[in-house]
Image: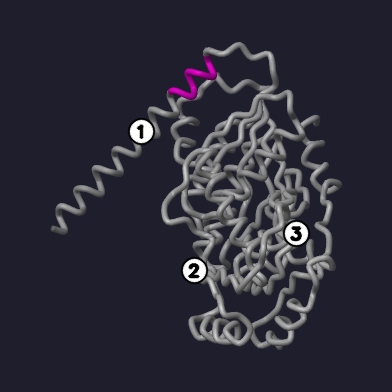
Amino acid sequence: MKLFRRLKYKFNLLERRLSNSLEAKRLVKKLSDKNHNRRRIFLFQTPTHSNIGDHGIAEAEIQFLKKSFPNDQLVEINQSIQPYFVKYVGNTIRKDDILLLHGGGNLGNQYMYEENTRRLTVAAFPDNKMILFPQTIYYSSDEKGHAELTKTKEAFSKSTRLTLIAREETSFVVMRECFPNAKILLTPDIVLSMDMSRPKLIREGLLMVMRSDQERILNEENHLFLKELGEKYFDKIISSDMHYSRGVAGSKGRREVLGFKFKQFKSAKLVITDRLHGMVFAAITQTPCIAFSNYNQKVAGTYDWIKKLNYVRFVKIDSNIEKEIESLLSIKETDLSPLIDFDSFFQGIVDEFNL
């Protein structure tokens, strides 16, 4: 039985690789056959995995690009076909094409598929304008982290027109130190460019969106404490996460999953989360939220952008959480802070396209 499962896994893996390779070849051919009288923008590394926060980033990136550059041709290259596309594309990429890399929190040695694919892409097109959408950088301080950072420095040094965008202050400082030849910008997480607060829905219950992976710092005892505290105030508690039950492919699937998730947030009276995009989704849906940190700076750093919102609180597990719950529940819907307009910060990304 174990042998059968291993063989089945290998067969499925080979089938996926062949499918991704063929899809990349079809896209390259399609691009080669077209007459190009418009500027082309390539968005690389959009997710096909199950992380809903990353899909929120991809959707925000695409909306931002379509709004900012309506006359340009936008080409999306997802992370599954990306290595094959880079291999096959050759001279199909022109010098005036602008290449963008998906943002998020995977610039570092925690998620090596994303790291290796990004290195491959940056190094493959050294003369093109290359922009990394807002990212968190985090390399562990051990030997492995130092070794992987050295490899990324080498790959990034090949690009002559590289712009890296940090989404919080700590990453901005680290990027400037690690990549002195790149241009470094600082903006909020791109999902904060979206307004998902309408239509308004009837709110009920508590939505708990908690990590269960290697990034969490809250343990099971902390989770149980928060749930028991929630039971004092809510008859209905939904325990959720920012992962879909399977990988998500294509723009239609992405929008369907995000639509369900945004509705889930807008239907809650309160969100408790230790996920960055749990906090961000609460912010853009005007949902009262208590947020905790993860293992690096990304939640705390992103909170600095939205700390003026009266309905989002960033706390530690030993804080008076009960007091925070009561305070948030006392805010009337009409008294919730309006969403923050970050257009002036994101304008810096738009300006990069013309340099």
Is 307 one of the magenta-colored residues?
Answer: no
> Please, which colouring scheme is shown?
one colour
Helix, strand or loop at label 3? It is helix
Residue 295 position (above or below residue 70): below
Badge 1 local density, few (<14 within 10 Å), some, or many (20+)?
some
Picture coordinates of residue 184, whole percent (x, y) = 76, 48
One can see residue 42 in this view: yes
- Residue annotated with mark 3: 173
Residue drawn 49% across the image and 68% down it: 214
- What quarter of the picture does the C terminus occupy? top right
Which circle, 3 or 1, is nearer the viewer?
A: 1
> Could you classify mark 3 by the number of other residues whose Cα lies within 10 Å: few (under 14), some (14-19), or many (20 or more)?
some
Left or right: residue 151 versus residue 198 is: left
- Dot 2, how many residues are within 10 Å of its Cα: few (below 14), some (14-19), or many (20+)? few
Residue type at tag 1:
Ser
Tag nearer the camera, 2 or 3: 2
Which marked residue is nearer to the observer: mark 2 or mark 1? Answer: 1
Residue at position x 74%, y 51% in the image: 195
Residue 28 lies in the magenta-colored region:
yes
* Separation of marks 3 and 1 at Cα, in angstroms: 41 Å
- Up/down of 293 relative to 68, above or below: below
Residue located beneath label 1 in the image: 19
Residue at which label 2 appears: 214
- SS assignment for the magenta stretch, majority: helix
Q: Which residue is at the front of the view, 224 or 237?
A: 237
* Residue extent of the magenta highlight: 26-32
Of the residues shown, which amino acid type is indicated by label 2? Gln
* Disc 2 and disc 3 in contact, CB within 8 angstroms: no
Closer to the chain start, of discs 2 and 3, is 3
Q: Is residue 318 left or right of residue 349?
A: left
